[in-house]
Image (cartoon, helix red, strand yellow):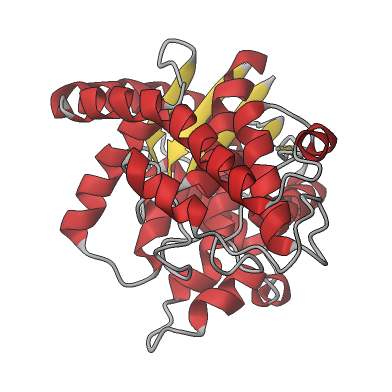
Amino acid sequence: MRVFSGIQPTGAKHIGNYSGGFRQYAATQERGDAFFCIVDLHSITVEYDPADLHERTLDLAAMLLATGLDPDRSTIFAQSHVTAHPEAAWLLSAVASYGQLGRMTQFKEKREPQEFVSAGLFTYPILMAGDILLYQTDAVPIGDDQRQHLELARDIAERFNARYGETFKVPTGIYPEEGARVMDLQEPTKKMSTTGGTPQGTVLMLDPADVIRKKFRSAVTDSGREVRHDPGEKPGVSNLIEILSVTSGESFGEIESRYDGAGYGQFKEDVGEAVVALLEPIQKRYLSLRADEGELQRLLALGAEKARAESAPTLETMYERMGFVRPG
C-alpha cells in the first residue's frame, strides 16, 4: 500500500498536530510504502519570513523523525526539492473547478484577516492534490480539518481519469477516530492553533513540562463536576477527555469511569501529566536531531532523490495523455 501525507513548516507545532498528524504518520509507515512531505511550497501562500521558512523546514524534519518516522522505512522530503509537484499542480488546474475551490472552508477562514489575498491561497488545494496523486497514493493519513481538501483531490483524480484516461489511483483518507481535532484549552469551541488560538490554550510540542502543567490546570471546563464526553454540552471537558485518550490509549468510557465523582481538579492535573510524559522523550530526540543540521539536510536529499524517481512516471503519463509533445 502506498501512503502519502504532508505537513506545512509554519508555526510552532502543538499537540493538535501530534494528534492529527505525527502519531498517524508513525503508525501508518508500518502499513506500506510511505511518503511524508514537508510542503514548503504551500507555506508561501500567506505572508511569511524567508529566513523563518528555512529554519521551520529543518525544525519540522527533526520533529517528524523525533515522533517516530524512520528514514529507512519512510521517504521524508521537502516539496520544493521535487519539481514534479508544481508541474502536476498546473496540469491538474485544467480539471479543477473554480466553484469547488471557492467553497473550500480553509480559504474562507484564512482570507478574512488578510489585507492581501494571494492567488496561491485560492489554488493551493490543487497543489495538494498533485502532491498526493503523483505517487499513486492508496491512503492519506490526515487531520480531520483536511477532509474537504482530500475530497477535492479525489474529485480531481476522477475527473482527470474520465477526461484523459485512467491515470491516477483515487486515494482514501485515514482519519484518527479519537482526538481528530484538538481544541484550544481556553476556547474549547475553537481548534488549537498557533495563529488563531490563545497562547495559554495552545500546548506546544516543545513547551517545558511546568508550562504544560500550568496550561492544563487553567484549562476551561464548566460549572459542573462530571467528567463526561459531550462536546455539545461540555466542550472543554470533552476536549480534555480526547487528549487523555490520545496520550493514554484509554477509551472515553474508561476515562469517564475512572473519574466518576472525582471532579475536575485532579482530572486536569492528570491530563497535564500524561501530556508531559508523552512529550518529554520526543523533546529529547528532537533536540538531538535538530543540533545536526547537516544530517537533516542529507536525509532530506536522500528522500527527495527517491521521491523524484517515484513521481516521474506519473508526471510523464500526465503530459502524454494531455497531448503534449514530449522532448525527443
Q: Residue furthest bottom?
A: 115
Position of residue 34 in the picture relative to residue 96 (left or right): left
**Closest to the observer, 224 or 39:** 224
Look at the picture and state if 211 lies above or below 77: below
- Residue 152 point in image, percent of width and height: 71, 57
* Residue found 50% across the figure and 24% down from its top: 310
Residue at figure coordinates x 79%, y 54% from the top left: 226
In-front residue for pair 26/79 = 26
**Quarter of the image where the C terminus is located:** top left
The extreme top residue here reads 72
Quadrant into which the N terminus falls: top right
Q: Where residue 305 appears, x then y in whole percent?
A: 35, 23
Residue 73 percent location from the top left of the image: 49, 12
Image-based side of 24 in relation to 170, left or right:
left
Q: Residue at x 46, y 45 (%)?
A: 85
Residue 241 visible somewhere in the drawing: yes
Task: Please state if 304 lies on the left or on the right of 18 as rendered.
Answer: left
Above-or-below relation of 216 to 308: below
Does the rendering let one see residue 80?
Answer: no
Which of the 4 image quadrants contains residue 210?
A: top left
- When asked about the image quadrant of residue 10, the answer is bottom left
Q: Residue 271 at x, y = what percent?
A: 57, 41
Please count the marks in the image: 0
Query: Which of the 4 quarters of the picture holds residue 43?
Result: bottom left
Query: Which residue is found at the position 52% from the left and 27% from the top?
Result: 35
Towards the viewer: 43 or 318: 43
